[in-house]
Amino acid sequence: MKIAIYGYGNLGRGIEAAVRQNSDMELFGVFTRRNPETVTTNTEGLKVYSSDDILKYKEEIDVLIICGGSATDLPEMTPELSKNFNVIDSFDTHAEIVNHFERVDKEAKANGNIALISAGWDPGMFSINRLYGSAILPDGNDYTFWGRGVSQGHSDAIRRIDGVLDARQYTVPVPEALEKVRNGENPTLTTCEKHLRECYVVAEEGADLERIENEIKTMPNYFEPYDTTVTFITEEELKKYHSEIPHGGSVIRTGKTGFEGSHNHVVEFSLKLDSNPEFTASVIVSFARAIHRMHQRGEVGCKTVFDVKPADLSVLSSKELMAHLL
Amino acid sequence: MKIAIYGYGNLGRGIEAAVRQNSDMELFGVFTRRNPETVTTNTEGLKVYSSDDILKYKEEIDVLIICGGSATDLPEMTPELSKNFNVIDSFDTHAEIVNHFERVDKEAKANGNIALISAGWDPGMFSINRLYGSAILPDGNDYTFWGRGVSQGHSDAIRRIDGVLDARQYTVPVPEALEKVRNGENPTLTTCEKHLRECYVVAEEGADLERIENEIKTMPNYFEPYDTTVTFITEEELKKYHSEIPHGGSVIRTGKTGFEGSHNHVVEFSLKLDSNPEFTASVIVSFARAIHRMHQRGEVGCKTVFDVKPADLSVLSSKELMAHLL
């Protein structure tokens, strides 16, 4: 199957690397809104095209992976491109997913294409685990913890403060909260009670550090409700210790069974990722395989990760899966 | 949807309790090979029938859950019953799954029924997580740890030793092995290197404890290759501290991504279960919902957990799932 990448940032590069690990796939090329001559890929011979020309290649692409941002790119791109391609995106604005789904579904169905939205790990693998957990243990509670990992939005918010040159913000689960949930204590916890915010900040020379720290810690929504720590470091330290984009977290379902509800169960799915965009890309690529197969079986319209049977994600045959993984 | 239970042991009772937690299901009744009058259920008014009479109720049962043993019951029961019912079982002899599948598939297809084999947690939820892990991270390693939990087979093996009145064996993951895997060290580990065996034994008065301990520790396959501990306890202690059937474990996938394979990822799915049969039953009941829906859409033949899309497991609608769990 031929995969094309639409948008070549961190996620696009992750897709490029992930496709190489899958023997049943090849990369058709990269589409960019920039001047294609200014884009250098990591793969010898991989073609870069202008996004303006994409319709010319309609017949040569099995699945188009759209690597845009959820705020403004994907709400436009995914419905539009699903008129002509089987597409997949990682739309992650949870509150807007139903709207996005309906817009994509309309275009994909009208044109006989298949689309899958919101692939990745949250939404994505975390969502799947929330679903399995709640279906298996109906009398129970859901908990999602994020981190330890870099939050791009929170890092950007710090960078906008006067006197700040650069910053990196880590979201960190509160160990005591995680422990309580894992012990099956079923605590009631807000997002703030579940997470700490660690900030590493490079300030301008002579900047008022106390003011910067105060501005961070009192920033509404972003930091004010959280237990926040601020550490000032040098630009060299930021480069040396904070240049990667790790992330992870846990989805935990706790629930009771039995005639008296006396037996407790804890189901946990957790991720520890060195690279958030590369892992997200790896998830997307396996779902690209699935929607290609589903389309070959005649399925059209918009799907989510909930609509994909696990067998469709794997390069292995049904018999191999049964013999080796079941 | 109407669920019937075929076989009323620990698993059958677990199904009875689990169905109560699902508002879209009701219990039709229990079928037993024993004299129905000798079977007392935990549900007021629940009917108990002889398994000989089951064909009389063919039209009244949506899904029949077969609660038999994998050694001799299920290889006979599941193909036979799938001639007349939509069925689900928890067949767990990994090496025989492909054969079992083919025999069930033939009968179910020939008669327009649907069947799902090997539901539970291993095979079952662990299998699903092995599949997701290997599909997402093709360049990686799989690890399955079982425990801490009671192994019925190993407990029985101890009970057969001369001078032993009762026994309970716990399979326990080796903490250091688990730690290495979680750290992404990708160790090569045999099942024996991953697990310890803890034995709690009630001996006859005056029995030669040293001989019993030695017979346990040198028992081929069961204990000899493992680090095994034997603790002698009283019958009262066994009842007080070891009357439950807890289990659990972890499926861990570690893998690399990126152009240089320099980023490591650890994906872990873990279970901590107070009651092995009740959790197994809860998984089975959610898959019973799924195969009922699949059959209503016209699907027939034998399926595994790999063939079920997550959305079919949940009582929630597609839109509710998107809004609340995605």
Image (tube, coloured by chain):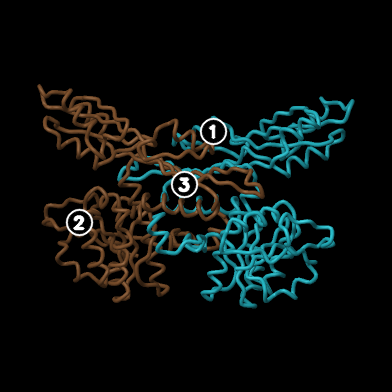
Chain colours: A cyan, B brown
Q: Nearer the viewer, residue A4 or A101?
A: A4
Residue identifier under label 1 = A177
Q: Nearer the viewer, residue B42 or A74?
A: A74
Give the farthest residue toward the front. Answer: A44
Q: Look at the image and tell me in which quarter the C terminus of chain A lies.
A: bottom left
Chain letter for mark 2: B
Q: At label 2, which amino acid type do we have? A: Thr
Residue A26, visible in the rendered structure: yes
Q: Report the front residue among B126 and B314.
A: B126
Q: CA distance from mark 1 to mark 3?
A: 29 Å
Which residue sits furthest right? A206
> Within 10 angstroms of label 3, few (less than 14), some, or many (20 or more) residues?
some
* Residue of label 2: B72
Amino acid carrying mark 1 in the image: Ala
Q: Amino acid at mark 3?
A: Asp
Q: Residues within 10 Å of mark 2 (few under 14, many from 20)?
A: few
Looking at the rendered structure, which numbered label has been put on residue B142? 3
Instruction: Please determine if labels 2 and 1 lie on a single subunit.
Output: no
